[in-house]
Image (tube, helix red, strand yellow):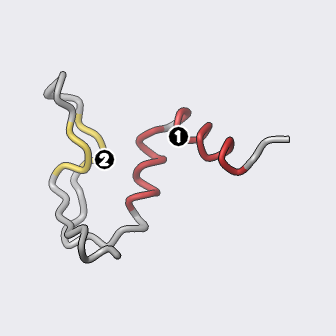
Amino acid sequence: MQSRYDDIHASSLAGPGLFWEQAAEEISWFRRWDAVFDASRSPFPRWFGGGLLNTCHNV
């Protein structure tokens, strides 16, 4: 029997961009991101570029 964790983990592997975009929707952003993931500056990829948040605000 597959657990909820197993389902969530499988979805994160199958589509990491979509998985993290959905997770980020649960956070209060001051400015939404331009792109979830930008690999154009490899080996230094950027997650949620253009986004602005205050982690203290998201308690």
Mark 2 neighbour density, 10 Å: few (under 14) some (14–19) many (20 or more): some
* Above or below, comparing residue 32 to residue 28 in the picture: above
Q: Secondary structure at mark 1?
A: helix
Q: Position of residue 43 (x, y in %)?
A: 18, 22
Which quarter of the picture shows residue 57?
bottom left
Which residue does the image show at 16% across and 29% down from the upper left?
44
- Tell me how far mark 2 sits from mark 1, CA to CA: 14 Å
* Above or below, comparing residue 11 to residue 44 in the picture: below
Q: Position of residue 25 (x, y in %)?
A: 40, 64
Which quarter of the picture shows residue 40?
top left
- Horizontal side, residue 1 vs residue 54: left or right: right
Residue on which disc 1 sits:
12
**Tag shown at residue 29:** none
- Horizontal side, residue 8 vs residue 41: left or right: right
Name the amino acid, label 1.
Ser
Which quarter of the picture shows residue 14?
top right
Q: Secondary structure at mark 2?
A: strand
Name the amino acid, label 2.
Val
Q: Looking at the image, is mark 2 or mark 1 nearer the viewer? A: 1
- Horizontal side, residue 41 vs residue 35: left or right: left
Which residue does the image show at 21% across and 32% down from the upper left?
45
* Above or below, comparing residue 6 to residue 32 in the picture: above
Which residue does the image show at 65% across and 47% down from the upper left?
5
* In-front residue for pair 8/15: 8
* Quadrant of the rendering where the C terminus is positioned: bottom left
Residue placed furthest toward the right: 1
Q: Position of residue 28 (x, y in %)?
A: 31, 73
Residue on which disc 2 sits:
36
Q: How many marks?
A: 2
Q: Are marks 2 and 1 in contact (CB under 8 Å)?
A: no
Mark 1 neighbour density, 10 Å: few (under 14) some (14–19) many (20 or more): some
* Quadrant of the rendering where the N terminus is positioned: top right
